[in-house]
Amino acid sequence: MSNVISLQAVRELRELKNLDDIAYKAKILAMDKFELLEEMIKFQQQRSTIGHLTVEMMIRGKILFKELEEHAETKELTLLARSYRRHLEYELSSRSKVES
């Protein structure tokens, strides 16, 4: 019976994850440009430390880089943020196809 999965438990975990994502988005929306850049550096350091992107990191990165893209003061930062956000979206969609 160790292979039995409670659908209710899965739903509750998914709802908690969505609330966590909403909280992160609210945190990002409250940041100024300098704080967004600091968050980007923190994101890159975490990715380097772990050595790969987790699904949670991809979701948070997508939120972060979308905000950076929208508030960048230079064309170069806009392009960098857009490129990285699209990469994260591609990785997420690839993972969800593999898991399906």
Image (cartoon, rainbow, N blue to C red):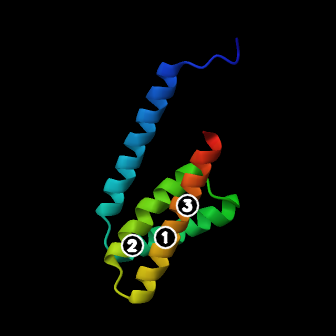
**Image quadrant where residue 87 sits:** bottom right
The furthest residue to the left: 30
Estimate how packed mark 1 is, as few (under 14), some (14 to 19) or many (20 or more) residues with alpha carbons within 10 Å. some
Estimate how packed mark 3 is, as few (under 14), some (14 to 19) or many (20 or more) residues with alpha carbons within 10 Å. few
Q: Is residue 63 left or right of residue 6?
A: left
Disc marking residue 68 = 2
- Please identify, in this view, whether the residue under mark 1 or under mark 3 is nearer the observer: 3
Q: Mark 2 or mark 1, which has the lower sequence index?
A: 1
Residue 35 seen in render = no
Identified by mark 2, the residue type is: Leu
Q: Nearer the viewer, residue 19 or 41?
A: 19
Identified by mark 1, the residue type is: Met
Disc marking residue 40 = 1
- Please identify, in this view, whether the residue under mark 2 or under mark 1 is nearer the observer: 2
Quarter of the picture holding the C terminus: top right
Which residue lies at the image location 60% right of the left edge and 46% below the top edge? Answer: 97
Estimate how packed mark 2 is, as few (under 14), some (14 to 19) or many (20 or more) residues with alpha carbons within 10 Å. many
- Please identify, in this view, whether the residue under mark 2 or under mark 3 is nearer the observer: 3
Q: Mark 1 or mark 3, which has the lower sequence index?
A: 1
Q: Position of residue 60 (x, y in %)?
A: 47, 56
**Image quadrant where residue 15 sits:** top left
Residue 27 seen in render = yes
Which residue lies at the image location 39% right of the left edge and 73% below the top edge? Answer: 68
Q: Is residue 54 left or right of residue 38?
A: right
Asked if marks 2 and 1 touch (Cβ < 8 Å), the reply is yes
Above/below status of 56 relative to 9: below
Disc marking residue 90 = 3
Above/below status of 48 relative to 73: above
